[in-house]
Image (cartoon, rainbow, N blue to C red):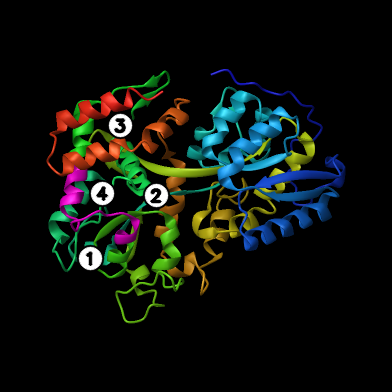
Amino acid sequence: MTMQFKTTSRLMAGAALALALSASAVSADTIRFWTTEEQPERLVKQQEMAAQFEAATGTAVEVIPVSESDLGTRTTAAFAAGDLPDVIYHTLQYALPWAEAGILDTDAATDVIEELGAGTFAPGALAMAAVDGGTAAVPVDGWTQMIVYRKDLFDAAGLEAPTSYANVQTALEALHNPPEVYGFVAATKVDENFMSQVLEHVFLANGVSPVGPDGFVPLDEAKTTEVLEFYKALADASPPGELFWQQSRELYFAGRAAMIIWSPFILDELAGLRDSAPPTITDDPTSSELASKTGVVTTFSGPSNPDGAAWGDIRYFGITSDADTDAAMEFVKFSMDDGYTQTLSIAPEGKFPVRRGTADAPAKFSEAWAKLPVGVDRKAPLGDLYAQEMIDEIVGGLDVAQRWGVSEGQLSLASKMINGQAINRIVRQFIDGEVDAAGAVAAMNDELGSIE
């Protein structure tokens, strides 16, 4: 992949991480910041940060909300017109394509990361946006998909945490007791993106991917058969029917599921902080009892991939090729250092810190994040609701977070494969006994290989 780099003058000292930012380090009177965090309460927090940055540097920041669904087309149009904003908060899917197109100033992003200290960032977040000579954009926050499980039931049965296919299957045998308690609630509704997301996580766990550096790579039959048989075991320990996120959350909240796969956005609901999705395991919908009985696993492994994998979603600050570079760099550094706790506070339950701390205080930001209040109808810090080992597991997943096609430069192709839902459909056919493992692998390879 050929990356287009823009060389810019670097007038700042290498020690530009001092807590007080100097106005002389910034040349622009105003920079523009596009953000997809467009909810009113989140915009207020970003505008407060912009005001703090202006007070410290003399540079104003115009915070401009952009719908995530419109971000790609608006950015492409602005690039063609030579009118990009200075900084864009964007999803993983744009990092490498925008770098290749020349939309992002990868030198500037790399300099910011080096000045903040590359070793203070989660390796997985940096690896996902790696380009020749550096990083396409600055990782800001992210989250990892989780196996959410009843730690109290596991402990009572003497079970190991569900960190591997084998441990999960052992737990299914011990805890599946329908209709009182189902061992799992697998995603089986073919036309739901939830099933696509869960399956990618399960495939990654066993080291299986349909893409390589040059595009489609046929799925390995032996490894994929392990994935299929494991997922069928999950489905066999689930209730009948078309299952997706709603049933998995409802059954777990009712105390009728030993394990589910979910995003961290379940964490505040699990603790009784959101009236629209209350735990029903007790008579008190505001109780944090279920949270206290819950454990999570972010990285789990299959038999062919002992190191395992975490499915991660990372967001980035992209410094654009039209930016006032020095001012944009200072704003990103402020947002990732002095203002980083505030950056995370925009939505702590879905913004895990990709920067744990500083060289002098390695856990500074992860500790501050655990104290940030989460919830909707009631508020409480995650650190008050969950044990420190669980907090560490939640944040630690970002160290090894992966997605199909990222490291190979084929995220766009992989996304088409996932979004086409052929994998969902064929896995469901295998679960239902309509096709054997060899036939399922052949069918997936046939359909995925035709996608361009």
Q: Residues within 10 Å of mark 2 (few under 14, many from 20)?
A: many
> Residue 145, labelled with which disc?
2
Q: Earlier in the sequence, mark 1 or mark 4?
A: 1
Q: Secondary structure at mark 1?
A: helix
Residue visible at 24% across and 25% down? 220
> How far from the left and from the top, in percent, is residue 360?
63, 49
> How far from the left and from the top, in percent, is residue 123?
50, 38
**Residue type highlighted by circle 2:** Gln
For the residues labelled 1 and 3, the Cα–Cα distance comes to: 31 Å
Residue visible at 29% across and 36% down? 423
Q: Earlier in the sequence, mark 2 or mark 3?
A: 2
Q: Earlier in the sequence, mark 1 or mark 2?
A: 2
Which of pointers 4 and 2 indicates the residue nearer the eye?
4
Which of pointers 1 and 3 indicates the residue nearer the eye?
3
Which of pointers 3 and 4 indicates the residue nearer the eye?
4
> Residue 188, labelled with which disc?
4
Q: Is residue 169 visible?
A: no
For the residues labelled 1 and 4, the Cα–Cα distance comes to: 25 Å
Q: Earlier in the sequence, mark 4 or mark 2?
A: 2
Asked whether, in this view, residue 230 is left or right of residue 298, the answer is left
Q: Secondary structure at mark 2?
A: loop
Asked whether, in this view, residue 35 is left or right of residue 297, the answer is right
For the residues labelled 1 and 2, the Cα–Cα distance comes to: 21 Å
> Residue 208, labelled with which disc?
3
Would residue 3 be counted in the magenta stretch?
Answer: no
> Residue 153, labelled with which disc?
1
Q: Is residue 214 above or below residue 248?
A: above
What segment is highlighted magenta in the picture? 230-248
